[in-house]
Image: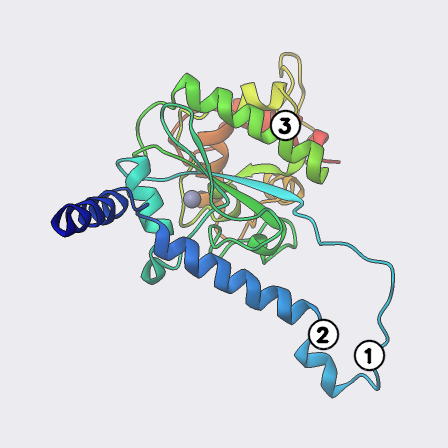
């Protein structure tokens, strides 16, 4: 009888061990970190202690909201690989959402917390994109076409983010928009027009009959759209990949008309 009980306990132990989620440690770490943040939020920020005379709590406040959505491709070989990357401390990278090839969406971080997906980047005068954005990673090796399942899930997710946080259409952008010298994601196959047609991101109107103004300055137009124009060749590359779906760093007359049409939507 004793033997039977021992065997039963061993089987239960083995069963629970085999069913252990690979993310148990990461889940535990998440809980610990959010607990520390919630404790920190209950008192004045440490910096204010040096300048403020007293801590008089206001009654009127809420959480800060994300105002941008940054779309990425993972440049990895599978969703599992990405989940592992984002649950490993030494990588120091993360995103709020990961969308797998079959359309499964993994939510990895509360929308109100800051993920580490943008790196060094700039959009308009915003130099800390991570603090104001949601990062969405789409499982893609960097060259493949995105699956229809991924795009359907993405559009659904974007709708929910837009409704919840009031993200303006112009603020749904790509990683290469904010870091054109370092990043090329999402890749050339990403259907930005389809997204813009659904209200996520801005697209250019038909340029037939468009006359470029004589004094049209394409660098200033890039700047108005949001690009950091320090490296103009990199910006042209990012612009052409996204809006003309070509890998090129040459801005021809037709491209300039596209840019002009886009620029007018940002005025
Ligand atoms: Zn990226």
Spatial CA span between label 1 and label 2: 8 Å
> What residue did someone put label 2 on?
43
What's the residue at 77%, 54% (across, down)? 62
Ligand 1 picture quarter: top left
> What residue did someone put label 3 on?
159
Would the CB of label 3 be found within 8 Å of ligand 1?
Answer: no
Q: Position of residue 49 (x, y in %)?
A: 73, 84
Q: Nearer the viewer, mark 3 or mark 1?
A: 1
Of mark 2 and mark 3, the one earlier in the sequence is: 2
Of mark 1 and mark 2, the one earlier in the sequence is: 2
On the question of residue 27 being in view, the answer is: yes
Tell me: 4 left or right of 82: left
> What residue did someone put label 1 on?
55
What's the residue at 15%, 45% (across, down)? 4
The answer to whether mark 1 and mark 2 are in CB contact below 8 A is: yes
User: Crowding near pointer 3: few (<14 within 10 Å), some, many (20+)?
Assistant: some
- Outermost residue on the top side: it is 208
Identify the secondary structure beneath mark 3. helix
């Amino acid at each position: 009888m004793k033997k039977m009980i021992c065997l039963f306990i061993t089987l239960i132990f083995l069963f629970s061990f085999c069913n252990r989620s690979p993310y148990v440690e990461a889940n535990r770490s998440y809980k610990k970190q959010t607990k520390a943040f919630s404790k920190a939020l209950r008192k004045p920020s440490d910096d204010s202690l040096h300048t403020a005379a007293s801590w008089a709590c206001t009654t009127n406040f809420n959480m800060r909201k994300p105002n941008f959505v940054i779309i990425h491709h993972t440049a990895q070989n599978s969703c599992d690989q990405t989940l592992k990357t984002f649950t490993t401390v030494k990588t120091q990278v993360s995103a709020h959402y990961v969308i797998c090839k079959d359309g499964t969406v993994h939510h990895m971080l509360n929308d109100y917390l800051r993920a580490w997906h943008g790196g060094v980047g700039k959009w308009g005068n915003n130099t800390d994109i991570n603090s104001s954005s949601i990062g969405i990673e789409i499982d893609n090796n960097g060259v493949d076409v995105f699956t229809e399942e991924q795009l359907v899930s993405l559009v659904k997710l974007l709708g929910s983010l837009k409704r919840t946080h009031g993200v303006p259409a112009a603020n749904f952008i790509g990683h290469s928009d904010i870091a054109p010298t370092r990043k090329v994601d999402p890749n050339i196959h990403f259907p930005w027009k389809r997204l813009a047609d659904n209200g996520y991101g801005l697209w250019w109107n038909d340029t037939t009959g468009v006359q470029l103004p004589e004094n049209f300055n394409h660098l200033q137009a890039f700047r108005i759209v949001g690009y950091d124009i320090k490296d103009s060749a990199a910006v042209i590359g990012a612009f052409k990949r996204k809006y003309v779906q070509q890998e090129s760093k040459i801005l021809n007359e037709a491209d300039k008309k596209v840019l002009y049409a886009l620029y007018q939507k940002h005025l």
